[in-house]
Image (cartoon, helix red, strand yellow):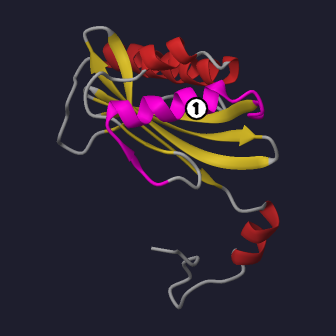
Amino acid sequence: MVKTQALSSQAPETDTSEGDEVQGDAARGDSDVQAVLAANRRFFQAFADRDVAGMEALWFQGEVRCVHPGWPALHGRDQVMRSWRELLGNPRSPGIRHQGEQVSVCGDVGWVVCEEFVANTALVVTNLFVRTVAGWRMTHHQATPISSAAAFEDASAYEDEDGRPPTLH
């Protein structure tokens, strides 16, 4: 069972179950969604506050990956934490905000997709969390620039022979 909640519109939580149920307790699913949301908000708070200790505490102690916009994929806690120390320690780094959180949980894995705004750049973000004995910890962060609204509107006029919009992959 995947518990999903789109929080930007306060839509009700939905269950998507296709026979491979991982957890059966709806109350646990609701609290898991809220716990993953709280972990995601701690991530953005640490980012906004340039809180290196808070950022390091949020990341999983095991296998992690991170893809910052325009950077190659980083692998391993040492590389990932070094990148955050550099970003958060740069006094010229612009402010950050986020919106439109959509949270999903499946067993011991939760993820959030949202929009992030850094200076004048809009990004789509995916944050992946794993359940640990210490709570939900980030194991993957990826941020990708969003094309301008005008570019989306221009592309929406194009469809393939089946009426589907164009894709890059």
The x, y position of residue 11, in whole percent, is 59, 32
Side of 59 relative to 132 (left or right) = right
Q: Residue 101 in magenta?
A: no
Q: Residues within 10 Å of mark 1 (few under 14, many from 20)?
A: few
Looking at the image, residue 59 lies above or below residue 101? above
Can residue 34 be seen here? The reply is: yes
Q: Residue at x 33, y 23 (%)?
A: 60
Looking at the image, residue 132 lies above or below residue 127? above
The residue that disc 1 covers is 86
Q: Residue at x 68, y 33 (%)?
A: 98
The x, y position of residue 140, in whole percent, is 40, 37
Side of 24 relative to 10 (left or right) = left
Q: Give the secondary structure at mark 1.
A: helix
The x, y position of residue 22, in whole percent, is 20, 30
Q: Residue at x 74, y 34 (%)?
A: 93
Side of 141 relative to 117 (left or right) = left
Observer-nearest of 2 and 66? 66
The amino acid pointed to by label 1 is Glu
Looking at the image, residue 88 lies above or below residue 6? above
The region drawn magenta spans 72-95
